[in-house]
Amino acid sequence: MRVIRKQPPVTRGLMELLRLGLNQRPSDAQSRLVSLIRSNGLYAKQQSCDGGNGGETVANMRLLVPLIRPTDITQLPHGWFTVLEAAYEHLSDRAGLRRLYRMYILMARTLPEAVYVQRLRSVSGEQWQEDCDAIVDFANRHPFEITYGGNNPAYERLLREEQLTQAAASYCYRGSDNHSWMYLLDLVAQVDPECCKSWLNVMLLEPDSELYRMHSDDSARYVEAWIRRIETVFGEDFASDLASRIISMFPRRDQLRAWLEPYCNADDEAKETEAVNELADNPR
């Protein structure tokens, strides 16, 4: 009598991955793969046995330091998919590697994973544009997936290196965090400068914004970093106007004033001084 063993979830997941890769169009397979990986928990970063973020750090370091030897499948950067990646490399299966690297880019959540953009580029060859289009198409159709759990450094690197302005705007406006906005600001601004300026006004000129919740030097420096970035993209006038208006909103925040005053021109400083005098009896 033949005994049929039930496959564990991981094995079933790998078989489904292979089936999808062979029988579906890249864009459809990509969408299904992301759902498959998350539903099986194959991509979840594993914590080290000593607690904290050590597991995530070590796992991602293996992307850059391949001599680190794992002792358990959960210590691999992408679990069983890392084994599949090794098999594709051994078989010189470029099509298989392209599918995996597209998936890794779409699901990246840490900076070391951005290396997969270059790895995909190296194996894609003449299909590089096709792979880029497939990644961007998925990101545009599934904006929640692409930013699920935080920003996506690998996708952002792709947007930056390929100068994909429309895709960058879609990525930022659909829910990416402030870090992504700052990094991709020049690309987003090229699509619709006035719309981008309006978004910046809302973010920086709202007194109750998270940017101003902490009355500290670190908070002030972060606001200054935004003004510096805005100056490189939109020029001195717009940055100076924002800096002056922010100082006027918080006349008692000396640290914020010290960081932003260098961006204010003489006229702005005079207006700001007048505003401070008017608000002296009613500080925030």
Image (tube, grey):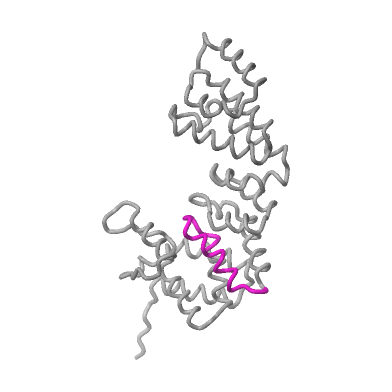
Please give the name of the residue rendered at 55% of the width and 42% of the height, measured from the top-left corner: 178
Residue 105, percent from left and from top: 54, 62
The quadrant of the rendering that contains the N terminus is bottom left
Q: Is residue 9 left or right of residue 139?
A: left
Which residue is drawn at the image coordinates 53% and 66% (left, top)? 33
Q: Is residue 78 above or below residue 11?
A: above
Quarter assignment of residue 24: bottom right
| Of 27 and 82, the residue lying toward us | 82
Q: Position of residue 271 (x, y in %)?
A: 64, 17
Q: Is residue 124 magenta?
A: yes
Q: Nearer the viewer, residue 173 or 246?
A: 246
Verify whether residue 39 appears in magenta: no
Task: Identify the residue at horizontal 59%, vertical 37% (top origin).
Answer: 228
Magenta-colored span: 104-126
> Relative to 143, is 234 above or below?
above
Residue at the bottom extreme, as displayed: 1
Q: Is residue 7 above or below residue 110?
A: below
Q: Main secondary structure of the magenta part?
A: helix
Work out whether residue 272 or residue 86 is closer to the camera in this orientation and state it: 272
Establish if 5 lies above or below 215. below
Residue 72's image quarter?
A: bottom left
Q: Position of residue 195 (x, y in %)?
A: 70, 38
Location of residue 18 in the rendering, given as x and y in whole percent from the top left corner:
52, 76
Please indicate whether residue 82 sits to the left or right of residue 231 in the image: left
Left or right: residue 217 compared with residue 140: left
